[in-house]
Every structure is written in C-alpha cells, then in structure tokens.
Image: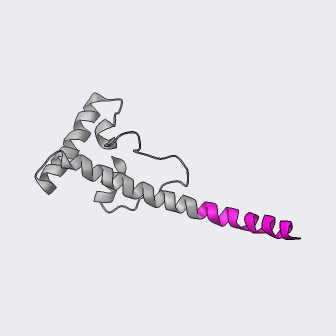
Amino acid sequence: YEIFVANRLKVPVVLARTLVQAGTHAASPSRAASCFSPVDVQRIQGEIEEWGQAQHGRGDHGYTMVDKAIRRTMQSAKRNMMWTSLKILWPYTMMIKTRSAI
C-alpha cells in the first residue's frame, strides 16, 4: 500500500537490492493484504476503494491500481538486482573462462 501511495504522490520509490519480493502471494495482493490493526485495515481499504471510485467509477478498481503500482515497482527492483548481479558475476565468469583456455 505504501508503494502505491508513494507512486500516487510522485515520490520516487527505491527498493533495497534483494531477492525478496512484495505482493506475490495472491492474484490480487492488495485484497489479500492484512495488518495488525482492524482499524488500519478498514482505513486502508476505504482509501483504496475511494481512489478506485474517484478514478474509474468502481471502488474495486482501486485494488487493481494498487497491484499495478506494486508490480511496476517490483519489476524495476528486479531489473536492478539482476543488473547488479551481472556486473558482479561477469568478471568472475571471464576469469574462469580465461583460466580454462590456458
């Protein structure tokens, strides 16, 4: 949810370079999300549905928008992680290949 709100407010989101993912446990992670406080659950769901109603005339569409924002952010983080891994592993791969050619 916080990723979605940050995207909505045009706040840049940068995730840690990790293999851990967010929002992958359900078809609609935002619908399945939970938190400790029932009051917070109601508030967050209300905000999501209000935004969906305001933007698309359907409250349930807000969950789709939250899920898209999370997926977009996670895809960007995954690309960054893969690029970092490639930069780290490429020299070792070339060193091993060079040694085996000798």
Residue at the image point whose x is 16% and y is 47% from the top: 50
Residue 14 at least partly seen: no
- Where is residue 95? Give x, y as percent: 79, 67
- Residue extending farthest to the front is 101
Q: Give the answer, above or below, for where 13 lies relative to 37.
A: below
Residue at the image point whose x is 31% and y is 42% from the top: 30
Residue at the image point whose x is 85% and y is 70% from the top: 101
| 52 horizontally vs 18: left or right | left
Quarter holding the C terminus?
A: bottom right
Q: Could you say which quadrant of the image residue 6 lies in?
A: bottom left
Q: Could you say which quadrant of the image residue 39 lies in?
A: top left
Is residue 93 rendered magenta in the image?
yes
- Residue extending farthest to the left is 57
| 94 horizontally vs 68: left or right | right
User: Which residues are drawn in magenta?
Assistant: 84-102
- Where is residue 76? Give x, y as percent: 45, 61
